[in-house]
Amino acid sequence: MRYFKILCVVLFASLLIACHQISSGTVVDKYIDEPHTTFIPVMTGKSSVLVPTRTKRRYILVISGYVGNEHVEETFEVTAEEYKHYEIGNTFIQDAVLENKEGDE
């Protein structure tokens, strides 16, 4: 029962973190979070073992916008194609379909 409560708290916290206040705004920064190794503790009986886990490359855009009268900056994880498309100063719209510059082939 104790683990169920911890799981519920972690799940609820992740849902709160995943919610964005803004869905569009101006790109003020962009960066790539390179892959790295992290260690996750895993319980094996009474002892714990650190298990290495490799993260994936993440493409991050920092978006600036307004919620009411409040200025907000949020980070959005995007695909490599979207990362290449957006430059600092461009307008970002979440879930917008990027246009093919070469035209439909």
Image: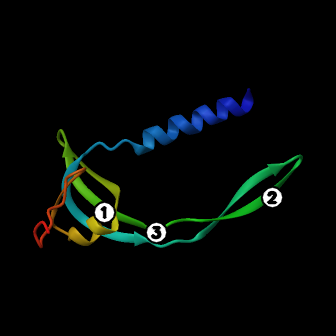
Residue pictured at 73% horizontal, 61% vertical: 51
Could you give the CA–CA distance between mark 2 and mark 3, rounded to whole angstroms? Answer: 25 Å
The CA span between labels 1 and 3 is 13 Å
- Please, is residue 88 above or below residue 78 in the view? below
Spot occupied by residue 79 in the image (x, y as percentages of width and height)? 34, 63
Three-letter amino acid code at the position of disc 1:
Leu
Mark 1 or mark 2, earlier in chain? 2
| SS label for mark 2 | strand
**Residue that mark 1 sits on:** 61
Quadrant in the rendering for residue 92: bottom left
In the drawing, what numbered circle is on residue 39? none
Find the residue positioned furthest to the top: 1
Quick check: 77 left or right of 90?
Answer: right
Q: Position of residue 57 (x, y in %)?
A: 46, 69
Which disc number belongs to residue 57? 3
Dot 2 corresponds to which residue? 49
Residue depth check, mark 2 versus mark 3: number of the one nearer the observer: 3
- The crowd level at tag 3 (other Cα within 10 Å; few <14, some 14-19, many 20+) is few
Amino acid type, mark 2: Val
Q: Earlier in the sequence, mark 2 or mark 3?
A: 2
Q: Report how far apart the C-alphas of labels 1 and 2 lie in the structure.
A: 35 Å
x, y percent for residue 43: 80, 49
The answer to whether 102 appears left or right of 8 in the picture is left
| Amino acid type shown at disc 3 | Arg
Q: Dividing the image into 4 quarters, which one contains the N terminus?
A: top right
> Residue at 14% of width from left, 69% of height from top?
105
Image vertical order of residue 80 relative to residue 1, above or below = below
Q: Position of residue 87 (x, y in %)?
A: 20, 71
- Asked if marks 2 and 3 touch (Cβ < 8 Å), the reply is no
Lateral position of residue 103 relative to residue 95, left or right: left
Residue at the spot 88% in from the left edge and 46% down from the top edge = 45
